[in-house]
Image (spheres, rainbow, N blue to C red):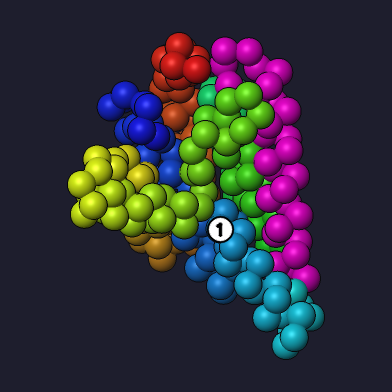
Amino acid sequence: MERYGARERLYAAALSGLAGYVDAVGFVQSKGFFVSFMSGNSTRLGVGIFGSTADALAAAGLLVAFVIGVTGGSLLGRSSGGNRAPAVLIAVATLLSAAAGIARFNYLPACFALTAVAMGAMNATLEHQGRVRVGLTYMTGSVVKVGQALADRLTGGGGAWFPPLLLWSGFVGGAVAGAIATSRLGLDAFWIGSAAALTLAVVGRTISVSLAEQN
């Protein structure tokens, strides 16, 4: 994030906001599982192994779905040339639409699995040379960077605290929006997430060029 310009930082924050939105909808509707935050699901897996086989299987399924999404998103991004962001986000939008459609038939495990695949794939939006440049669906790294930057400032350095804080704020803002949307729409809130992904795909056509120039 530090090497991005203002426009690219805002774009990354918007992507993070989408992840927070989708994760909040999934969290509320699945009664406490995550579709983008795999550290939380790893904890649910560990606790479930000890206390609930059903919870352990649910968490494991979401973890596997997320990894599949990361793999697929990376492969799609690498084959898309200079159109990485639009290509990946169109796939994300398609998966979220499919999840919302399946939810209408109460196939909830499939719905949440598709959503986890979508969130895994979204991390490839800003990938460069096979590595994720910005973690969009998990915020622990951003919070750590804020703390490290503050430590730098306290010791006379010039740590950049604002970019990771902006990313975190985007995620939290998206989560608030997701909580509001799911309270009113239930799993139909995923349709809004799909529309947002398509919008970001359109915006990403110009952002992709800018990011490529910075690589």
Question: Residue shown at 47%/57% (left/top)?
Answer: 140
The image position of residue 38, as x and y in percent, is 61, 59
Amino acid at pointer 1: Phe
The image position of residue 97, as x and y in percent, is 60, 42
Q: Give the range drawn in magenta.
A: 57-84
- Left or right, 24 with reference to 33: left
Q: Is the magenta stretch mostly helix, strand or loop?
A: helix
Question: Residue shown at 68%/50% (left/top)?
Answer: 66
Q: Which of 156 and 200 is in front in this view?
A: 156
Mark 1 neighbour class, 10 Å CA radius: few under 14, some 14 to 19, many 20 or more: many
Can residue 63 be seen here? The reply is yes
Question: Residue shown at 29%/43% (left/top)?
Answer: 159
Give the vertical position of 193 relative to 204 (above or below). below
Q: Which of 25 and 117 is in front in this view?
A: 117
Q: Is residue 142 magenta?
A: no
Mark 1 highlights which residue?
A: 37
